[in-house]
Amino acid sequence: MIDNPLCSIKLITLSLLHNGFRLLKVGGSLVYSTCSLTLAQNEDVVEHFLKENVNAELAEIDGARNWPCKSGGIPKTWRFDPLTSQTSGFFVAKFTKVAI
């Protein structure tokens, strides 16, 4: 039985993110995007991932400043809320793999 479904979703999401990032070459990029508006599935996952991966950096998303969105709770992340973007809402972050 799952006590906290959100915690379970976060663990699955982090596992998928780790696996995808592991497959990148140095200099490669990975976009993390959810259709969620929760901090737990967005900024919390990004912060947790960055703490566990010293070779991961958030990258600027070209053109994002022209999108109908707002900056996320972490620099270089973006939130699309229904009011601003006329969408159901989502979150976007871009990671780059750097040499350590």
Image (cartoon, grey):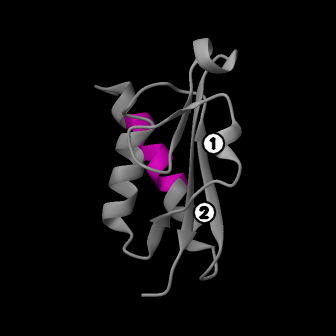
The answer to whether residue 62 is above or below residue 55 is above
Check if residue 78 falls in the magenta segment.
no
Q: CA distance from mark 1 to mark 2?
A: 26 Å
Disc 2 is placed on an element classified as helix
Q: Position of residue 72 (x, y in %)?
A: 45, 37
Residue linked to disc 2: 20
- Lateral position of residue 48 relative to residue 30, left or right: left
Frontmost residue, 74 versus 53? 74
- Horizontal side of 11 relative to 58 (left or right) equals left
Residue 15 is one of the magenta-drawn residues: yes
The residues colored magenta run 8-16
93 over 100 or under it: above or below:
above
Residue 99 visible to the viewer: yes
Q: Which residue is mark 1?
A: 65
Q: Locate residue 77 relative to residue 24 in the image: left or right.
A: left
Give the farthest residue toward the top: 83
Q: Earlier in the sequence, mark 1 or mark 2?
A: 2
- Nearer the observer, 96 or 52: 96
